[in-house]
Image (cartoon, rainbow, N blue to C red):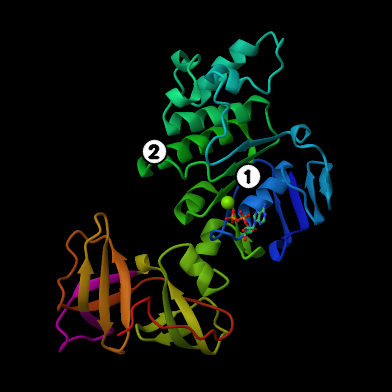
Amino acid sequence: MSVLTVSGLSKQYGATLALDDISFSVAPGVRAAIVGPSGSGKTTLLRIIAGFETADSGTVTLGNEIIVDGGLGVPAHLRGIGVVTQDGSLFPHLSIAENIGFGLTRNQSDRDARIAELMDTVELPRSMAERRPHQLSGGQQQRVALARALARRPRLMLLDEPFSALDTGLRETMRRKVAEVLREFAVTAILVTHDQGEALGFADQLVVLKEGRLVQAGPPRLLYLQPRDPAIARFLGDAILLQAELADGAARCALGQISIADRTRRGPATILLRPEQLRLRPDNPEHAGGTGGRIVEVEFGGASSLVTIALDADTSTLLQLRSSDPAPPEPGTHVAIEVSGAAYPFDGTTALEPLGKAKR
Ligand SMILES: Nc1ncnc2c1ncn2[C@@H]1O[C@H](COP(=O)(O)OP(=O)(O)O)[C@@H](O)[C@H]1O
Ligand SMILES: [Mg+2]
């Protein structure tokens, strides 16, 4: 059983096909994230589900109710959907309490108590109740927007880049807080974001959009380790992509022989490794047994540094990886490269530029 089912949804703006035959479903209580580059159709999809925009074709079902059927739909305020947008969209002339209570009926006897309770839930001091939105910080305003969206006990919560205007530290705190509140209320939610870290940390299920099409959907771990194509691999994190020759459960490549899960695959393929699978160990090139290379450049980046390596096996191309080693090897040093775990071969024999981004 799923609470939300999107089926064959399409939307065109002039010559732009913003959504092209999108289908997916979200189970009750699940937190899903829709990710994709800017312009891939994320906001359009959310606005159609919310009822702020009409579809050209396709359906959206919420619970047992069809809320979108082609160009027809249930009015937005009757859908039981809570929405939090990037800017919070608070009513500037209303107090915080009035903003949060906006969807509650005027004469509801427990209205004030409910507002106070919602302020507690999102950890807003009750002393702020009479302030106006402009007297709050960005993070506090987003808490108000979240409380307002929760007030009517929505069946589904839609969050469109709600943290993107916040500073890095606050963004993470808010993301955790929102995830915690959604879990506590057992609300099904869809988060839209172009930030892969945010998506991987927040969601139980990812939906990847590209140019209006759904390119892959599934659990974050699966998509991170087994993306359908190199573009999704790069989008979800740092990716090391190598040309390899597959045979007998192994991939032979510039980093030596690396195991692969599928023993039946043979022939040329592009393989994926994640940087956390690689370890660098200073060594002497004369004694070097396995695979190695020479450090070309180390770019300091705080918690991690970007290390560029010229591989012994193929000095014409450079391997780049982020290392969290507090003292990464100096430029000029020769290193052995140890690979742990399996490589993931993509389907087909996509030709791509080898080894990371740089090329000599
Ligand atoms: N109201 C609109 N009128 C015309 N084109 C639009 C409108 N809304 C979105 N688009 C276009 O549809 C595509 C998808 O936009 P959007 O859903 O906002 O993407 P995202 O949220 O992933 O950045 C873009 O090419 C955008 O320019
Ligand atoms: Mg958008």
Where the C terminus falls, by quadrant? Answer: bottom left
| Front residue of 261 and 155 | 155
Residue drawn at (45%, 37%), measured in percent from left and top? 174
- The x and y percentages for residue 99 are 59, 22
Instruction: Write down the quadrant of residue 20 in the picture.
Output: bottom right
Left/right placement of residue 96 relative to residue 75 reads left
Residue drawn at (53%, 20%), measured in percent from left and top? 96
Between discs 1 and 2, the one toward the N terminus:
1
> In the rendered structure, does residue 88 fall within the stretch colored magenta?
no
Residue drawn at (40%, 86%), measured in percent from left and top? 253
Which residue position is annotated with label 2?
A: 170
Secondary structure found at label 2: helix
- The x and y percentages for residue 93 are 56, 21
> In the rendered structure, does residue 284 fall within the stretch colored magenta?
yes
Rendered view: 117 above or below 140 = above
Q: Quadrant of ligand 1?
A: bottom right
Secondary structure found at label 1: loop
Which residue position is annotated with label 1?
A: 30
Instruction: Write down the quadrant of residue 341 in the picture.
Output: bottom left
Q: Which mark is residue 5?
A: none
Cα–Cα gap, marks 1 and 2: 24 Å
Q: Which residues are magenta?
A: 278-294
Residue 39 in view, yes or no: yes
Rendered view: 300 above or below 81 = below
Check disc 2 and give the amino acid type.
Leu
Residue drawn at (54%, 57%), measured in percent from left and top? 220
